[in-house]
Image: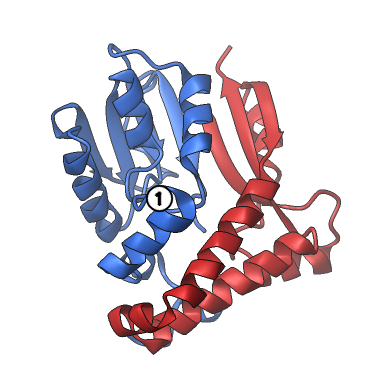
Amino acid sequence: MSQERGGRGRRTLSEKYEAFSSEAARRLRAHALGTATVNGYTTPEQAQRVADALAMTAAQRLLDLGGGRGWPGSYVARRSGCRLVVCDLPAEALYEARITLDDEALADRSALVRADGRALPFSEGSFDGVTHADVLC
Amino acid sequence: MAALVIETGAGLGADEVALAAELGPSDVRSAGSLEELSREVGLRVDEVADVTEAFHAALGALWEGLRRDESELRRAEGDVEYDYEVGRRRSMMEAVRRGLIRRTLVVATKP
């Protein structure tokens, strides 16, 4: 991978998900943050706060905007039984999200959508709840 | 909506905001806090909680893990990626310590 990155040497969004995706990196995230699927800094305790605040039911639909590896949306969906749509721009993020959703047995009630958060392809009222965590960082 | 966001510290001047973007997430600059933006689009803000302390603790745990597993991570990810990751965590911890960035939980409802 080139040392030249987007924005003053920063990783681009795609690079963010390509880098540090080894098993060693997953173990690091799991040890430090309590889950390997995290793509920001949301701990399981904070994911529970999000779940409590949203109070989703099995009949409802949640949007995880800029959901990266599918966290914390997958946590909320697993706890509540709700349907989940993980939306993000980098294909690499959605690839990782698919692994998360398969691992969490959420594949049959979730969907991945590649879209820009500034122009979402959903009609008004499509979701009962929205979450996002550390988008664009 | 229940969201967690990294934002610039309250009451920063332009130079400090620029430094926050340098040390923290580059997109940390925005038109306002998530709380303010939520109100602007007509949401009722039900809860705002500062989770910066937990954010700093998470950064610290990642930093410690990076140092502990250095040889394994260098092998798996390469020196460039490893050094980049260490540098980012260090600069973000500094940004938090200096009050340049904070992390906030915002819960808002459409009335």
Residue A81 position, x and y percent, is: 28, 19
Query: Chain B appears what colour?
Result: red
Residue located at (58% from left, 60% from top)? B59
Front-most of residues A122 and B48: B48
Q: Quadrant of the N terminus of chain A?
A: bottom left
Expressed as whole percent of the image width and height from the top left, the position of residue B76 reads 29, 79
Tell me what residue is drawn at x 29 percent, y 29 percent.
A84
Secondary structure, mark 1, is loop
Residue A19, image quadrant: bottom left
The correct choice, above or below, for A93 with respect to A62 in the image is below
Q: How many marks?
A: 1
Q: Colour of chain A?
A: blue
Question: In the rendered image, is residue A51 in sight?
Answer: yes
In this view, the residue farthest toward the front is: B68
Would residue B21 be visible to someone looking at this image?
no
Determine the residue positioned at 60% across, 62% down.
B60
* Neighbour tally class for label 1: few under 14, some 14-19, many 20 plus, Cα within 10 Å: many
**How is this picture coloured?**
by chain
Q: Residue A101 sits in which quadrant? A: top left
- The residue indicated by pointer 1 is A38
> Residue B12 occupies which quadrant of the picture?
bottom right
Q: Is residue B67 shown left or right of residue A19?
A: right
Residue A42 left/right relative to B33: left
- The answer to whether residue A17 is left or right of residue A33 is left
Q: Position of residue B50 (x, y in %)?
A: 71, 39
Residue lying farthest to the left in this orientation: A108
* Residue at image location 72% in from the left, 60% down from the top: B96
Q: Chain of mark 1?
A: A
**Looking at the image, residue A69 lies above or below residue A21:** above
Q: Amino acid at mark 1?
A: Val
Task: From this view, report whether residue A137 is shown above or below residue B94.
Answer: above
